[in-house]
Amino acid sequence: MPTPTITRLSKSRIVSGLQCERRLWLETYRRDAMEIPAGSQAVFDTGNAVGELARQLYGPGLLIGHVDNTSRALAETAEALQRTGKRQTLFEAAFQHKDVLVRADVLRPVPGGYDLVEVKSSTSVKDYHLIDCAIQAWVIQNAGIPLRRVYLAHINTAFVYEGDGDYSGLLVVEDVTDSLADLREQVPAWVHRLQKVLRGDEPSVATGEQCSKPFECPFFEHCRVQEPKGPKYPVTILPRSAALIHALLGEGYVDLRKVPAGRLTNPIHQRIRHASVTGRPFLDPAVAGQLDGLGYPRHYLDFETINFAIPRWAGTRPYQQVPFQWSCHIEQRDGSLKEHAFLDLSGDDPTRNFAESLLRSLGTRGPILVYNKVFEAGRVVDLADWFPDLADALLALNERMVDLLPITREHYYHPAMMGSWSIKKVLPTVAPELDYDDLDDVADGGQAQLAYLEAIHPETPVDRRTTLDTALRRYCGQDTIAMVRLLQALAGR
Ligand code: SF4
């Protein structure tokens, strides 16, 4: 067990501590127990890229470096602020007060003091951003800097990139000074409380809602394994039912199987409970007839997309889902099956080739089966907006789309799905031989995005790119063959 001796805080560590005191303690003394989620590096890279862009937009100015050397960063900041002559904008200026260290994204000189601009890669102001700003303002003012206003700059989702590296308008700036007044008064108490936490032993906190709000806690496994094992089917598997789950837990029901049948009114909840109690799957025989009428050829379609905080291709918006890959298994009436596929790892705008190849493969007749239509249909609408000459043909695809998700939700449930109809939960119950755990490198949509980013990076070696190409094709193809197997299972074949 480590000896608790560290009391230095930063704004992010205070935010962690406000989420959960145990999290702050573990971040400080047990980083080895942290499970870093896939994609963290990408999130980090996005934050850095947006910060860098902000420096261009707010420049010129002086960047205070020394990321790993606090003393030098503090000294360089102090020196820059004391320099006589023309005051300048500072980026990443370092300040400390009561053992709390902050780095200010942008500090701009204004008559009588400075304005602080905190830059975020999110698309709106969140409550935890205000906490973040309040901590910074408290430290900076107590370090003797007269702060006039505090602004929060975040991504403007209405921005459309026109090309040529022109990103003016990407960030929207909100004055949050007035929203910080109450929070700023609370900062000293937070600091006092959290430094006390750091001087003690690991706090005893049970897992609960705080483990995912406002952020997924990377210590969840560490905490969960220390708790008594729960029931096989906890009430928490009931989907989209936070209020009901809260009420059931309050009534003492932890095990879904112990909840009286009459306590649940939603037919889906009743079905989940019944399957959990009996251990038997539910399949509505009426669905077979509904599926028989679909006709042929049947196109089982899935897209993979990428979204950039800072748009990469002209005509796209921040965080817009831009499709770079599709897979389609085409099934004929005689049962024969063939996969068509498209994947562009060139790093160039993939959308025109994506749209044209899609139209060629899907033709003009036969149902297009997707799982969660809103996603694929939305991407087709985007493509139609970008390419008016293809719009009619593209929008005609949406008319042929059949969504297997609501059909499955309405007519099928297996206890192993644990209250979820995600294709990853459904597939093992209808085609256990198709296991996503068997896929290398890419086994879910998030990993597909990371693989794409790695593949298009100019420094990725050719053989690695080939490996990623194969992994992406295998993953997307598995998603569409999964739908083939699902439809067969629903039809009782
Ligand atoms: S998993 Fe939950 S209880 Fe454990 S440290 Fe994280 S937030 Fe706290």
Image (cartoon, rainbow, N blue to C red):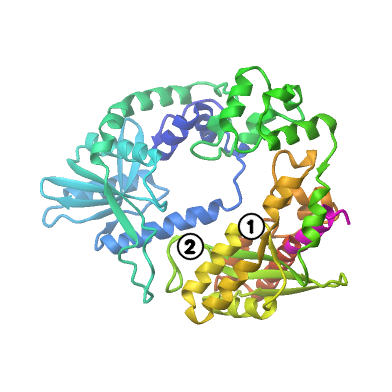
Q: Which amino acid type is shown beneath numbered disc 2?
A: Gln
Along the horizontal axis of the image, is 113 left or right of 366? left
Q: Is residue 187 magenta?
A: no
Image position, residue 472 (x, y; %): 69, 66
> In the figure, 93 relative to 304: above or below?
above
- Observer able to see residue 225: yes
Along the horizontal axis of the image, is 364 left or right of 287? left
Residue bearing mark 1: 445
In the picture, the disc for residue 240 is none
Q: Mark 2: is the Cβ under 8 angstroms from ligand 1?
A: no
Quadrant in the picture for the N terminus: top right
Residue bearing mark 2: 320
Q: Which residues are magenta?
A: 480-493
Q: Main secondary structure of the magenta part?
A: helix
Q: Under tag 2, what secondary structure?
A: loop
Q: Under tag 1, what secondary structure?
A: helix
Pick the front one: 262 or 341: 262
Image position, residue 443 (x, y; %): 70, 56
Image position, residue 312 (x, y; %): 45, 70
Say which label, 1 or 2, has the lower sequence index: 2
Q: Which amino acid type is shown beneath numbered disc 1?
A: Gly
Q: Residue at x 31, y 60 (%)?
A: 55
Along the horizontal axis of the image, is 485 left or right of 138? right
